[in-house]
Amino acid sequence: MVEQLEFFKVPNPCVGVCSSDDKGYCHGCMRKRNERFNWMSMTPSEQLHVIKLCRQRYRRKIMKQKSVVDHSVDEEGNTSPQSDLFG
């Protein structure tokens, strides 16, 4: 039996902000190094799981930022790339 998710391509969550934090998570998409490098070889189910993990990482990151009132807008009024993915 073929899983229905295999018929649909999961878009790559890269937002073009490709630098890592001290834990090894990408500042842009919140993926770990191996998740970024192995994205194309993952099944759609694995890719969706990685996106779910990235959402959780993003939410934890925001919760730790005590000084940020509105996490989707920075000091200059610009929206963050993660707010489009995980907001």
Image (cartoon, grey):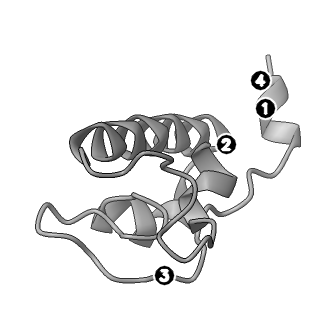
Choose between 32 and 28: the one closer to the eye.
Answer: 28
The answer to whether residue 76 is above or below residue 59 is below
> How far apart, in angstroms, are the residues tagged by discs 1 and 2?
6 Å
Quarter in which the C terminus is drawn: top right
Q: Which residue is disc 3 drawn over?
A: 17
Q: Compare marks 1 and 2 and give the one earlier in the sequence.
A: 1
Q: Which residue is disc 1 drawn over?
A: 5
Q: Residue at x 74, y 50 (%)?
A: 10
User: Farthest residue toward the right?
Assistant: 7
Q: Which residue is disc 2 drawn over?
A: 44
Q: Compare marks 3 and 2 and give the one earlier in the sequence.
A: 3
> How far apart, in angstroms, are the residues tagged by discs 4 and 1?
6 Å
Q: Compare marks 4 and 2 and give the one earlier in the sequence.
A: 4
Q: Compare marks 3 and 4 and give the one earlier in the sequence.
A: 4
Secondary structure under the numbered disc 3 in the rendered image: loop
Residue type marked 4: Glu
Q: Is residue 78 left or right of residue 56?
A: right
